[in-house]
Amino acid sequence: MSAYSRAEFGKSSKPRKGPGLARPSVLYGLFGLLALSNVLTLVALLMAPDIAALFDRQDERAFSAYEERILQLRMEVDRLHSRQYRQDGDMNLQMQELAQQQEFLAEQHRYVRILAEKAAELGLDADQFIVASADPELAEVASEPAVLGSVDEIAQSIEDMLAESRMALTAISGAAEQSTDEIVEGLGSVGIRLSLDGPDMAATGGPFIPAEESPDSESLADSANNVLEALTRFQQAREGLSAAPIHYPFATRFRLSSGFGNRRDPFGGGSAFHSGLDFAAPRGTSVLAAGDGRVTFAGQRSGYGKVVEITHAGGTLTRYAHLSTILVEVGKLITAGDVIARVGSTGRSTGPHLHFEVRRNDAPQNPQPYLDLARRLGAYLT
């Protein structure tokens, strides 16, 4: 090979620099510039007002949602706490209300016992009216709200007290009304009208039980006050019975020597009307007033000898004749059982005895039904 050829070959083996090819450093530089421009563009975008506002709003929404969730959780916790406090508060309040109601009913319970005792004093059967006292341990339970079941115990106690009190009140009222009717009808059978609705009704007394808001308590209070009225009427009827001219005119019993109505005249032998009852009592025996009243005559009457007359309520008059001694004066107020005279044999009499008459509107009445009424209703007499 020629020197020229070798020279040419050696030249041709080295790479040539063409105009379209770049050096590696230039390429790296271009890539770096491109990356830097992208970074700068991104920073510019992020720093733009609209883009920043967009990101800020997103952050605010996220923060608001977070705060709202926290608030909801707090509200839920508060609600649970409030419910627990409310339940505890309701339990305590219920305990206090039941304790107050139990205390009030216990007071009413004592009033029922007072009414039962009053009924017994008036002659009604007391055994059926006895009511038990309230359980004192329940008051201690009521003061301890934490005790389980204490609310139910107090409520049951109140129900038991109400039922027991109502039963006692019903029994007292029924017995008083029945006894009052019996007295009124008995006196009416002999023409004595007993009024229980007059001014004397204002002069009454006894425990008054105030009404409460609770329907049960109000019913019990009304029942107790109605019982008190029934007992007051019975007491008045009983006092009217005691004052009526129905009492036996002696402290002891004597033989009835002559009855009321037509009989054989002890002097002439013919038929004659006898206007009263004759009791064969010894001379000087104390004569007792048959009822409350006022002495309207004390002296001599033809055929009767020495006489005492007492006018009673309603115009009924009792006459005591053939007396040996008069112990009262006209105008004197008399109570049933007072000694007013002594047995004698004055006037048209065959021997010592008491002539006893009952008159209404100046017409003689048979005294026997009056005296029988006293025996029949003797349990109500004082």
Image: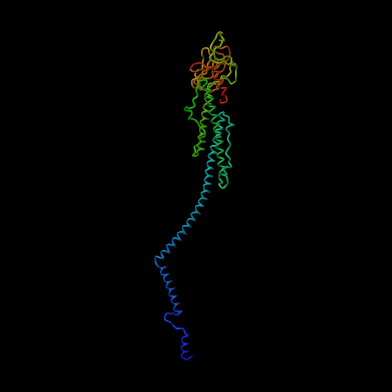
Residue 42 to residue 381: above or below: below
Residue 158, how many percent across, how many down? 55, 40
Q: Which of 338 and 17 is in front in this view?
A: 17
The percent coordinates of residue 344 (x first, y second) are 57, 15
Residue 45's spot in the image, x, y percent?
41, 68
Q: In percent of the image, x 41 and y 63: which residue is there? A: 54
Percent x, y of residue 87? 52, 48
Q: Please identify the quadrant where the C terminus is shown.
A: top right
Q: Is residue 61 above or below residue 289?
A: below
> Which color scheme is applied?
rainbow
Residue 83 visible in the snapshot: yes
Q: 80 or 317, which is in the foreground?
A: 80
Observer able to see residue 332:
no
Q: In this view, does 353 lie above or below 242?
A: above
Vertical order, 82 against 344 (above or below) = below
Quarter-of-image position of residue 367: top right
